[in-house]
Amino acid sequence: MIIDRLIEKIVAMQNPTCVGLDTQLSYLPEEMRAGVATCEQAADAILAFNKDIVDSVCDIVPAVKVQIAYYEQYGAAGMRAFLDTVAYAKDRGLFVIADCKRNDIGSTAARYSAAYLGETALEGGTMSVAGCDFLTVNAYLGTDGVQPFLDDCKQYDRGLFILVKTSNPSSGELQDLKLADGRCVYECMGDMVEGWGADLVGAHGYSAVGAVVGATHPEQAAILRKRLPHTFFLIPGYGAQGGNAQMLKNCFDRSGLGGIVNNSRGILCAYQKKGGTYAGAARAACLEMQADLASVLGEICAK
């Protein structure tokens, strides 16, 4: 099962780091941006940058997260760069999380799922379009908007990360509201995620249906970790958003398992602060992050 393979790679590397390829043109060195005047040129430059980052970190981190908004803004050329980035990262042995936060009514959700997790129907059969390992999903339309993604996870051995407690400062405006039964909205959503993932729990005790839980909300993370024993967390908010290793400790269990921590700008833009090549600085930033996480989590052990 895919969640077991991700966990096993995290344990083997002793590194629960995910590199966020939320790649903006402004993140690229000046020489790569010079003369870029079309969407096609921007997409080509970003893809070349991404490939170098992937090459520099693929032996020390288990996964990348590719945020589709940074590619959609360049139209068809950007979407091609997104798909090519996904394919390249997978070819280099990385797990790929497509950060698309998709959701809609069941029939439309099924099409989103086909695009990123499953297969698209054609007259001559079916084909995989993106072939991502995991997809982020917004589940606030309820079960019928999630079921198509769950079905494809089962059929194609894929995984989800469903928004539960997000890292943005205003998340509490909705997610922290109290329900009539005393739970907060984020606790209710977490309970639903734990239930949706019950049929996809792997050998290491975690489900392929995971939750997005921000590093910037440690108190809520502690509640969710205790409440959702089989739910694996995708943890944004480390670094540029203010999260640190101590803050996200609550997302993990006693074995150091239970989540993977995303860092985007802190890795992609490391060269802007520390000098050197962007690829070399990205690798150094990943190793620094690994050491920071290890100082809090200790040795990561499979169950």
Image (cartoon, helix red, strand yellow):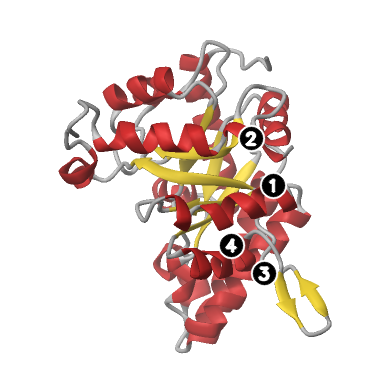
Amino acid at circle 2: Asp
Query: Dot 2: few (<14), some (14–19), or many (≥20) neighbours within 10 Å?
Result: few
Mark closer to the chain start, 2 or 1: 1
Judge left or right: residue 78 versus residue 220.
right
Dot 4 amino acid type: Ser
**105 or 239: which is nearer to us?**
105
Q: Residue furthest bottom?
A: 38
Of tags 4 and 2, the one toward the viewer is 2
The disc placed on residue 176 is: none
Residue type (three-letter) at the residue carrying disc 3: Asp
Quarter of the image containing the C terminus?
top right
In x, y percent, where is residue 67? 48, 59
Report which residue position mark 2 lands on.
199
* Callout 1 secondary element: helix
How crowded is the residue under tag 4: few (<14 C-alpha within 10 Å), some, or many (20+)? many
Q: Earlier along the polypeptide chain: callout 3 or callout 1?
A: 3
Q: What label sits on residue 84 in the rendered view?
A: 3
State how many labels appear. 4
Q: Which residue, as the protein is rendered here, is positioned at the far right?
A: 124
| Residue at the (44%, 61%) spot, across then down | 103
Question: Which residue is label 4 attached to?
Answer: 113
Q: Nearer the viewer, residue 295 or 175?
A: 175
Q: Earlier in the sequence, mark 3 or mark 4?
A: 3
Q: Residue at x 50, y 33 (%)?
A: 195
Report which residue position mark 1 lands on: 154
* SS at badge 2: helix
| Mark 3 Cα-neighbour bin, 10 Å: few <14, some 14–19, many ≥20 | some
Instruction: Give the image location of residue 37, x and y in percent.
Output: 45, 88
